[in-house]
């Protein structure tokens, strides 16, 4: 495909996403978000757009989009309602793990149905006493004939309630040293017996985030991703690179939405006989907000370009995630200040940005962890 054709394809896709957001998301986002109601009708439209197969290869029925195009889609979706992007983000991280590391039988069995949205998945990593330190998970999978018997609890799992399949990180050898050698990744369908209950959240509403209970759930050994034990942590961490690019793009969307809302408000709200945008204090805020957005966009596009080559992008994805999500937090706060009391009301959309943004700073690895990853990569790349 020529560069021009690729650019044209991206334009067509982004135009279709834009129409979908204006017609099917924006008019309903406020009410669904405030009610914390899962957007069933929006999800059905997302299936038709192919968003559940955005990064899945065309051979399996997906769109096979490059990470750069995917990041632009996520940014635009998040500018309208961030929760919608979360529904297909966790799904596509699971798909990436299957497509990169799964057996041919696993790819054939799952990827076409996941690309169509027939199966909507997520990644079950975090546990009640374990988040950043994944090697401390307690969920156990014991081999029993041709099955694994899985027991444990996972927490804060997107798509666990309304979705129907999860990539579950388990301990197949709890005595292994180092611990990651005893960790594996299993494809577990809801029909196999896990249950999930919805959790309440400050923001990021509408999308289902749940606590997952696995009580001696029998999973066929054929559902071990890659067919070999002890590779689970590496498999899922590879998928998290795409997840961090997604979260960075979400940060851009929220930061940009906060910036644009503030620019518009600054031109209509008047104090002391003139629009507040004429006051230097507000102008400084607007300039900083817009600059953060552009810098975040450049960092994220660079990370996405490296991801597309198949090269390691821990450093770049970490930088993009860190900067973009902090930009979302800072811009949402500044938007609230610019809007004053009006911004504190649920009738004003900037209130939602203020509640949504903090999730981005802790999801897909906390920003404190990102700083550690960045520092270690810098030392590794620049030895003395």
Image: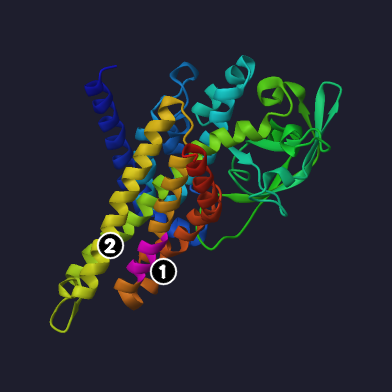
Residue matched to label 2: 288
The x, y position of residue 128, in whole percent, is 71, 54
The x, y position of residue 327, in whole percent, is 38, 57
Q: Quadrant of the N terminus?
A: top left
Q: Main secondary structure of the magenta part?
A: helix
211, above or below 97, in the image: below
Which stretch is magenta?
329-336
Residue matched to label 1: 346
Residue drawn at point x = 57 percent, y = 60 percent: 201
- The local secondary structure at tag 1 comes to loop
204, above or below 20, in the image: below
Q: How far apart are the two marked residues, 2 and 1, measured between alpha carbons? A: 25 Å
Where, by quadrant of the figure, is residue 283 drawn?
bottom left
Looking at this view, is 302 or 112 the one in front?
A: 302
Q: Is residue 353 left or right of residue 108?
A: left
Q: Give the farthest residue toward the front.
A: 384
Where, by quadrant of the figure, is residue 342 drawn?
bottom left
Residue drawn at point x = 30 percent, y = 36 percent: 14
Q: Nearer the viewer, mark 2 or mark 1?
A: 2
């Amino acid at each position: 495909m020529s560069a021009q054709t690729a650019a044209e394809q991206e334009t067509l896709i982004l135009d279709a996403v834009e129409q979908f957001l204006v017609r099917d998301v924006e008019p309903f986002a406020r009410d669904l978000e405030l009610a914390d109601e899962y957007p069933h009708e929006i999800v059905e439209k997302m299936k038709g757009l192919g968003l559940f197969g955005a990064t899945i290869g065309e051979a399996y029925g997906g769109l096979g989009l490059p990470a750069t195009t995917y990041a632009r889609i996520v940014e635009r979706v998040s500018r309208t309602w961030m929760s919608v992007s979360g529904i297909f983000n966790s799904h596509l991280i699971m798909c990436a793990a299957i497509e990169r590391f799964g057996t041919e039988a696993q790819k054939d069995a799952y990827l076409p149905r996941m690309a169509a949205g027939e199966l909507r998945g997520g990644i079950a990593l975090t546990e009640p006493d374990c988040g950043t330190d994944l090697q401390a998970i307690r969920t156990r999978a014991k081999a029993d004939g041709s099955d694994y018997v899985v027991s444990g609890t996972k927490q804060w799992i997107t798509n666990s309630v309304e979705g129907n399949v999860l990539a579950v990180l388990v301990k197949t050898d709890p005595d292994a040293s180092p611990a990651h050698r005893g960790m594996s990744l299993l494809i577990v369908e809801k029909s196999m017996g896990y249950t999930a209950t919805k959790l309440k959240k400050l923001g990021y509403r509408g999308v289902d985030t749940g606590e997952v209970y696995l009580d001696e759930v029998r999973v066929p050994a054929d559902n071990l991703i890659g067919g070999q034990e002890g590779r689970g942590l590496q498999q899922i961490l590879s998928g998290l690179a795409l997840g961090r690019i997604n979260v960075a793009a979400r940060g851009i969307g929220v930061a940009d939405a906060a910036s644009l809302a503030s620019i518009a408000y600054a031109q209509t709200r008047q104090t002391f006989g003139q629009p507040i945008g004429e006051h230097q204090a507000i102008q400084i805020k607007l300039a900083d907000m817009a600059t953060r957005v552009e810098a975040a966009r450049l960092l994220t596009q660079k990370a996405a370009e490296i991801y597309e080559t198949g090269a390691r992008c821990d450093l770049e994805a970490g930088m993009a995630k860190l900067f973009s999500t902090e930009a979302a937090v800072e811009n949402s706060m500044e938007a609230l200040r610019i809007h004053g009391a009006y911004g504190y009301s649920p009738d004003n959309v900037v209130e939602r940005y203020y509640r949504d943004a903090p999730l981005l700073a802790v999801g897909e690895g906390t920003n404190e962890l990102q700083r550690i990853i960045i520092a270690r990569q810098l030392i590794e790349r620049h030895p003395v």
